[in-house]
Image: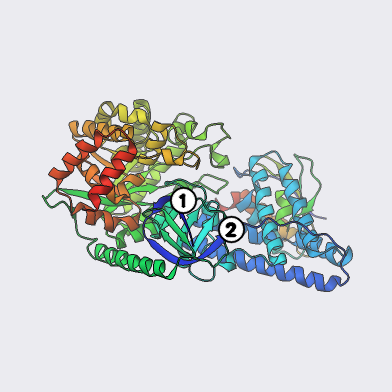
Amino acid sequence: MPSLILTIQHSSGLHARPAAQFVKMAASFPCSLTVRNITSNKLAANAKSVLSVLTQGVNKGHEIELVAEGERAEEALAAIKELIESNFGE
Amino acid sequence: MQKFIGLPASSGIAIGPAWIYQPVTVTIERRAVADAAAEWTRLQTALSMARTQLQALETRARENIGASEADIFAAHQMFLEDEELLGTLKTAVLDQRQNAEAAAYDSFEHYASALESLEEEYFKARAADVRDVSRRVLQCLTGKVDEAALEQPSVIFADDLTPSDTVAFDKDKILGLVTVRGGPTSHTAILARGLGVPAIVSAPVRLGDFLPGTMVILDGATGELTLGPTLAELNRARQRQAEWQTVRAAQLAAATQAATTPDGHTVEVVANIGNVEDARQAVENGAEGVGLFRTEFLYLDRETMPSEADQTAIYREVFKVMGRRIMVVRTLDIGGDKAVPYLGLQQEPNPFLGWRAIRMIRERPDVLESQFRALLAAGGETAVNLHIMLPMVSSLAEILRARELLDAARASLQAEGKPVPAVHFGIMVEVPSAAVLADLLAPHVDFFSIGTNDLTQYTLAVDRTNERVAALASPYHPSVLRLIKMTIDAADKHGKWVGMCGELAGDEIAVPLLLGLGLDEFSMAPSSVPAVKAAIRRWPLTECRAIAEHALNLPQAIDVIEYLKGLSTR
């Protein structure tokens, strides 16, 4: 199962606007996607659920682990990586 | 037929049915359901209803208020579409056979608690959002839907009204506002004046004592409220209303003419605005410019600082509406009474005496820097006569430091080759120390703008949002009048002009007093402009000077008000 570890650099972490963009991006792919806040040692959550992502409590500087399984898994991870590294387009 | 007297908050006469706004608190019923499939359909219908409400609220907020307010409703919609939440709801109803109310409450509460347990203020605040959506869904389930009820034009009654309460109302259906709490400068008063409808606050009514739909007469100028009037009273009220509307129409027709006294003295009459819509209304009502552009909305209900580009775009949009007219922008005036996590605001025991507004300049000069740059950039791209003023100034140091930042902002934009407009620099006089030191501060500014709402509050040590003491906060109090005179006299000596943007400037009866004291610029809610201009055209300046002198020697606010009221009925 392809996976990826990334650090969130956005000044507000995975809050409202970034969280919404993150979830929208994840939801656009058919594979299953989970996100886990490694820094806060959370359990993995559904990356397509904005409520679940928010409750991960991801702040600036936190590390998250993304795991994708299924159709276009690699593509999904690459797209999310791009989104995060571009600082959510800001 | 019952009569009540409250505090006048916005003049005019409203006649219509009462509509009572009482946000419903819902208790959760828990039971096992026999027909789970039907219950699931019921829940889906409620979710769909809630979604529709939120879409309408988002659209309304985007048109009437701003992008950030609208984004909150957009975020609420996202919660309702959350696939984990929907999965949990489905399981609860179809597998565990819970009733829809319990399933909804429990599912939302699961996420709200999880968010609350996180450390950051931002996440805790989102718990409130989740509970708000939960409440909405529960109201849709139990059939108590607040917004849909305002179907016909009505006089709205409430315990109190906050900006988030009123965003949901259809503005065209508001005939008037009555609140049990609140003072003359509360949100209700400001909203009513903005809408141009009558309002009464601190009304001694009991919301449970009369039926919704009861006919009501509201006189916003006297504070008189009549419930269930007799036919004779209704006829008299309709006549007064017609007379008032005729006067209003005549004032509006003359609104674009200058505000010149019969003996040839002209003053500037401008508007207080908070967004593009206000700016348009200001122009329609004959305002000669903007005397106060409140910029706080740009910073509220956001998780991050608005970027310079965001700010410039919004300022540009507002500036364009005003053409070449004067535009006085007030820099950010926010404190601990609001939740703005990215500014580092904390809960304070006395937020109105705390770390707010211009005081942020020491720890957070970056905030003011970016605002200056954005304002100058927008000013450079449009034709407004740009003025920038600082809120809550209490000492010279704040003025000097801000001036440094403004000069630096200007230099940096010039270095980038961007057009930079000439800009006038001034301060709000609202902290009493600024009024007392006006002669010392005048050399360092181009103008003063007196904020009578806060000046009154600070001078009399009265919280104007506390209805128990709100009636004490009168700008006609002799102490406040003396500070106003002190400010104008000091500015005059140094050749600087003085405007006023507090509610006093929009009060018709105050016109001869303020003219007599030498006020140069009157700034008010757009809907008040025509009436105030009409009043200025009736009062010769020489007479006004005598009036002001007499008023200043009266011992109490009530004496001043009675005196001025007596004059206005001549």
Q: Is residue B550 above or below residue B319?
A: above
Work out which residue is located at the far left of the displayed protein and give it.
Answer: B263
Hey, what amino acid is under mark 1? Answer: Val
Q: Is residue B62 visible?
A: yes
Residue B485 point in image, percent of width and height: 25, 34
Identify the element where label 1 is drawn.
strand
Tell me, what colour scheme is on the image?
rainbow
Position of the N terminus of chain A by quadrant: bottom right
Identify the element where label 2 is drawn.
helix
Compared across the picture, whether B365 is left or right of B42 comes to: left
Compared across the picture, whether B187 is left or right of B569 comes to: right
Residue A58 point in image, percent of width and height: 69, 44
Q: CA distance from mark 2 to mark 1?
A: 18 Å
Among numbered discs 2 and 1, the one appearing first in the sequence: 1
Pointer 1 residue:
B201
> Based on the displayed image, in which of its 4 quarters is residue B432 positioned?
top left
Q: Nearer the viewer, mark 2 or mark 1?
A: 2
Q: Is disc 1 surrounded by few (<14), some (14 to 19) or many (20+) residues within 10 Å?
A: many
Chain that bears disc 2: B
Q: Is disc 2 surrounded by few (<14), some (14 to 19) or many (20+) residues within 10 Å?
A: few
**Residue ID at (33%, 65%):** B240
Asked if labels 2 and 1 share a chain, the reply is yes
Compared across the picture, whether B465 is left or right of A69 comes to: left
> Based on the displayed image, in which of its 4 quarters is residue A7 positioned?
top right
